[in-house]
Amino acid sequence: ADVKKIAVIAGDGIGPEVVAEAIKVMKSTEELFGLQFEFEHGLFGGIAIDEKGTPLPEDTLDMCQRADAVLLGAVGGPKWDNNTKELRPETGLLGIRKALGLFSNIRPAVVFDCLKEASTLKPEVLEGTDLIVVRELTGGIYFGEKFRREGEQGEEAVDTCVYNVHEVERIVRQAFDVAMKRSKRLASVDKANVLETSRLWRETVNRIAPEYPEVELEHVLVDNCAMQLLRRPASFDVIVTENMFGDILSDEAAMLTGSIGMLASASLGEGSYGLYEPVHGSAPDIAGQGIANPIATILSVALMYRLTFGYEEAANAIEAAVKQVLDEGHRTSDIAADRAQAISTTKMGDLIVDAL
Amino acid sequence: ADVKKIAVIAGDGIGPEVVAEAIKVMKSTEELFGLQFEFEHGLFGGIAIDEKGTPLPEDTLDMCQRADAVLLGAVGGPKWDNNTKELRPETGLLGIRKALGLFSNIRPAVVFDCLKEASTLKPEVLEGTDLIVVRELTGGIYFGEKFRREGEQGEEAVDTCVYNVHEVERIVRQAFDVAMKRSKRLASVDKANVLETSRLWRETVNRIAPEYPEVELEHVLVDNCAMQLLRRPASFDVIVTENMFGDILSDEAAMLTGSIGMLASASLGEGSYGLYEPVHGSAPDIAGQGIANPIATILSVALMYRLTFGYEEAANAIEAAVKQVLDEGHRTSDIAADRAQAISTTKMGDLIVDAL
Ligand SMILES: CC(C)[C@H](C(=O)O)[C@@H](O)C(=O)O
Ligand SMILES: CC(C)[C@H](C(=O)O)[C@@H](O)C(=O)O
């Protein structure tokens, strides 16, 4: 196979620890499945602020642009929380999404059998929950003009939420495509009874829907969706929504599975390029202790194999290996019933490699 | 006592049925507690669109402005869902909030003992959940400029989110005041890592906080709050947030209690004036059948007594009467374990009046 270039951004907190295990897994698949990777590492987030004075250094961005896919650990931490905007890790995150054109964030929310009890939802409600939130990632209120001004009643702040037809079309088409490969049910979430951008969103969804006659489409208002996710999580298949709503709903959906430490995500652009990262954060409180759970990052690699490279067999193998190791009862401390029995980050990585 | 003027907007769907019971309860408190009310009725929402060609007729608004408090049933229904903006019930709702200056929406989310099982959350997680969402109601992206325009990539839609210092101050002060009367814990929810309006919000909260040294304040990002509500609902006391986030989070909070059909809400302005309504919607599917649950509307009356009129004793009596009737096992069909045993809307109203 041709050599795939992977840009690695380990980031902050537990990022480097979990990314190391994911790379270990990738390397072990090289021989097994005849794959070949070339890894390049770059600074990003808090560590880049400390070492380079900016969360997204140019050479890191160049490296990502040269690569076929990006593997990201986690960014941020209290150390940088009170920095000015330009010197905050989040600014790097928004910057890299925009610069790489990653307009689509794919967040599967599934329930791991062994973690069913970890959810605060009743098991019978959760039963069968397996949904994907497709979140628009480079538009909306995140990227619109923002400023302060003097108003009639003192200082005021302004954020602008903008969507053009093209931006809505491409994310909606992608969501329909995802739905076609699954249970063919799509919930489009908006606030069309209040927002103009939501009305454009809904019109666009309705215009594209006839191209996918097999997909059962429902429009759900965002406030109602926040409720329905709680009431009937298993009834959702694919949810597509704009940036801000997606931020909120994808986190709600992740949390209700009880498996938030195990969930992977993909951020995609046009074509097959993608950035892959665990849903969980940088967990500064446990960083450097070698106890972080690398599974979400390892499952992000499976997503990368499937969505960017089409390595379906290797992707399935990784997922099966993870399942096997969990079924055998191995747990990092975050998911262990008995913490005394918990294994380390590297041990979990090793076991998954062995299972492969 | 002096006569209090109540503007009654029964609205659509089950609105008229539940409002009738609430008025029955109010009337029964007149003699018992030496109160006096004068009721005036106005058209609003869908029915006003049908009969007057606008969701918020001027005489209805005049009536509300002349009154000391407003009692609202519910508005909307599929019949008007595809109307143009000017002819939609929601437009009336936003219009009346703005016209009456109701900048604060108070939504208690409590768990009723008899409905604990109705929640999809595990009872042990829900245990002790008793929170209030204080939502800013007349600012933000709901009321900012909205329009379409031709952009470089075709048609685009724009919504503008604006907050001035004054708007943030008054809602935040009110939330601190509410917290002072409760467990003195306030969670301020924003997206300060992305939005300029959120940064203004957070600065303002931090500036006001020293005026309330007894209140324990935490800042929570909106995506995190959507998760924490699921993970540790009982740890929240008062949550204050801007309009759009409040719309989403108050519905999530209401749903997780399992008691959404029983929750009351108040929308307040400067002074003691307020609009009171159940959290549930107009439920067109069961309208006219006499089976709707009037309890949320009756509890909205208790809120009105307490917050607008200071009739603390009568407010407590209504709440106690509701509790007694529920404890005796009486249920409308929405909350009945055995629907065959369910009682009607009017019967529920009568029983609560009797219990008073
Ligand atoms: C850190 C923050 C800017 C970011 C977002 O809001 O997009 C995060 O919450 C996420 O979902 O990736
Ligand atoms: C109907 C709609 C405009 C309204 C809102 O979003 O404010 C409703 O959801 C509410 O919460 O009262």
Image (cartoon, coloured by chain):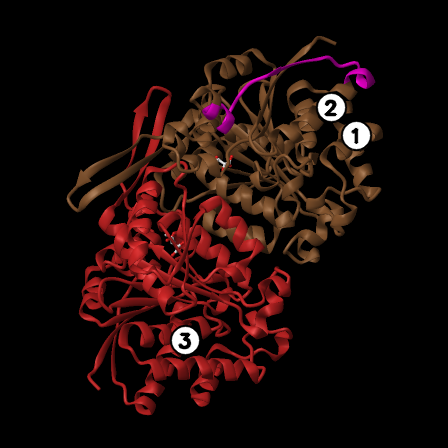
Chain colours: A brown, B red
Q: Is residue A2 magenta?
A: no
Work out whether residue A83 or residue A4 is closer to the camera in this orientation and state it: A83
Q: Secondary structure at mark 2?
A: helix
What is the distance, in whole Å, between disc 3 and disc 1 at their CAs? Answer: 61 Å
Determine the chain carrying the residue at label 1.
A
The range drawn in magenta is A30-50
Q: Are marks 3 and 2 in contact (CB under 8 Å)?
A: no
Q: What residue is shown with label 1?
A: A350
Quadrant in which the C terminus of chain B appears:
bottom left
Determine the chain carrying the residue at label 3.
B
Mark 3 CB near ligand 2 (8 Å cut): no
Q: Is residue B202 visible?
A: yes
What is the distance, in whole Å, between disc 1 and disc 2 at their CAs? Answer: 8 Å
Residue B285, position as x, y percentages in the image: 50, 62
Foreground label between 3 and 1: 1
Residue at x 51%, y 31% (from the top left corner): A172
Q: Are marks 1 and 2 in contact (CB under 8 Å)?
A: yes
Residue at x 67%, y 39% (from the top left corner): A262
Residue A58 is left or right of residue B122, and the answer is: left
Residue A345, position as x, y percentages in the image: 72, 35
Q: Is residue A41 magenta?
A: yes
Q: Earlier in the sequence, mark 1 or mark 2?
A: 2
Residue B296 is left or right of residue B89, and the answer is: right
What is the distance, in whole Å, between disc 3 and disc 2 at their CAs? Answer: 62 Å
Work out whether residue A86 or residue B266 is closer to the camera in this orientation and state it: A86
Q: Secondary structure at mark 3?
A: helix
Q: What residue is shown with label 3?
A: B298
| Residue count near mark 1 (Cα–Cα under 10 Å), binned few <14, some 14–19, many ≥20 | some
* Residue A24: image tag: 2
What amino acid type is highlighted by mark number 3? Ile
Q: Are marks 3 and 1 in contact (CB under 8 Å)?
A: no
